[in-house]
C-alpha cells in the first residue's frame, strides 16, 4: 500500500476506511462477520501532545504517557511494527478520531450488508458486550491488512 499521502498528513485530517472481523458464537460457526468503518481521522500527531492527555496528567486523572502498549515505531508517529508470539509480523497505522467524528459503520454477514442488530445476534455474549460498551478511544492502531482505503 502506498502511504505517501498518509505520511504527508502531519496533524491533518484524512479519510480512512478499515475493517475488522469478529468471531461468531459456536452456534454460528463458519459465519463470516465483518465490520467496516469509514471516517475522518487525524494522522501524524504525538499522543502525548493531545490536549486531553495533557489535561488528564495535570489533573491527576491519568499518569504520564509511557511507551507503546505493543510493538515499536517503524515511522514515528504514523506506523507501528509488531511481531507477535507466533512470529507473525504486522504493521499498524496510528489514527486519531476527530472530536466530532461522524463514523459510517457497515455490518456484513457472509459478505451481505446487514443491520447492526442482526450482526450482533451472531456474536458471543462477551463480544456483544464489548461492542455495546465501546466508545471511540482518543487513538487507535489499525492493522495494515485491515485498511481498505486512505485519502
Image (cartoon, rainbow, N blue to C red):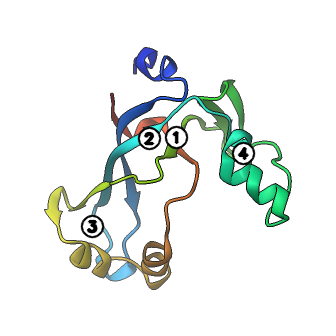
Residue under numbered circle 1: 95
* Number of marks: 4
- In space, the residues marked 2 and 4 are separated at their CA atoms by 21 Å
Residue under numbered circle 3: 31
Element assignment for label 4 = loop
Query: Is label 3 or label 4 in front?
Result: 4
Residue 37 drawn at (x, y percent): 33, 51
Residue under numbered circle 4: 70
- In space, the residues marked 1 and 2 are separated at their CA atoms by 6 Å
Q: Residues within 10 Å of mark 4 (few under 14, many from 20)?
A: few
First along the sequence among labels 3 and 2: 3
Q: Is residue 121 above or below residue 98?
A: below
Q: Is 106 on the left or on the right of 60, as rendered?
A: left
Q: Residues within 10 Å of mark 2 (few under 14, many from 20)?
A: many
- In space, the residues marked 3 and 1 are separated at their CA atoms by 29 Å
In-front residue for pair 14/54? 54
Element assignment for label 3 = loop
Q: Is residue 49 above or below residue 126?
A: above
- In space, the residues marked 3 and 4 are separated at their CA atoms by 30 Å
Query: What residue sits 72% from the left and 52% below the top?
Result: 53
Q: Is residue 67 above or below residue 34?
A: above
Q: Quadrant of residue 59?
A: bottom right
Q: Residues within 10 Å of mark 1 (few under 14, many from 20)?
A: many
Q: Which mark is residue 41?
A: 2
Q: Is 81 on the left or on the right of 34, as rendered?
A: right
- In space, the residues marked 3 and 2 are separated at their CA atoms by 30 Å
- In space, the residues marked 4 and 1 are separated at their CA atoms by 15 Å
Amino acid at each position: 500500500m502506498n502511504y505517501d499521502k498518509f505520511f504527508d498528513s502531519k496533524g491533518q485530517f484524512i479519510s480512512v476506511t478499515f475493517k475488522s472481523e469478529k468471531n461468531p458464537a459456536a452456534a454460528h460457526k463458519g459465519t463470516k462477520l465483518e465490520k467496516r468503518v469509514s471516517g475522518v481521522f487525524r494522522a501524524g500527531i504525538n499522543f502525548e501532545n493531545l490536549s486531553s492527555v495533557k489535561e488528564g496528567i495535570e489533573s491527576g486523572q491519568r499518569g504520564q504517557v509511557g511507551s507503546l502498549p505493543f510493538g515499536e515505531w517503524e515511522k514515528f508517529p504514523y506506523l507501528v511494527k509488531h511481531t507477535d508470539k507466533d512470529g507473525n509480523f504486522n504493521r499498524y497505522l496510528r489514527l486519531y478520531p476527530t472530536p466530532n467524528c461522524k463514523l459510517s459503520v457497515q455490518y456484513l454477514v457472509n459478505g451481505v450488508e446487514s443491520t447492526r442488530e442482526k450482526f450482533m445476534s451472531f456474536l458471543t455474549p462477551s463480544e456483544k458486550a464489548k461492542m455495546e460498551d465501546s466508545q471511540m478511544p482518543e487513538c487507535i492502531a489499525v492493522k495494515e491488512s485491515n485498511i481498505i482505503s486512505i485519502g
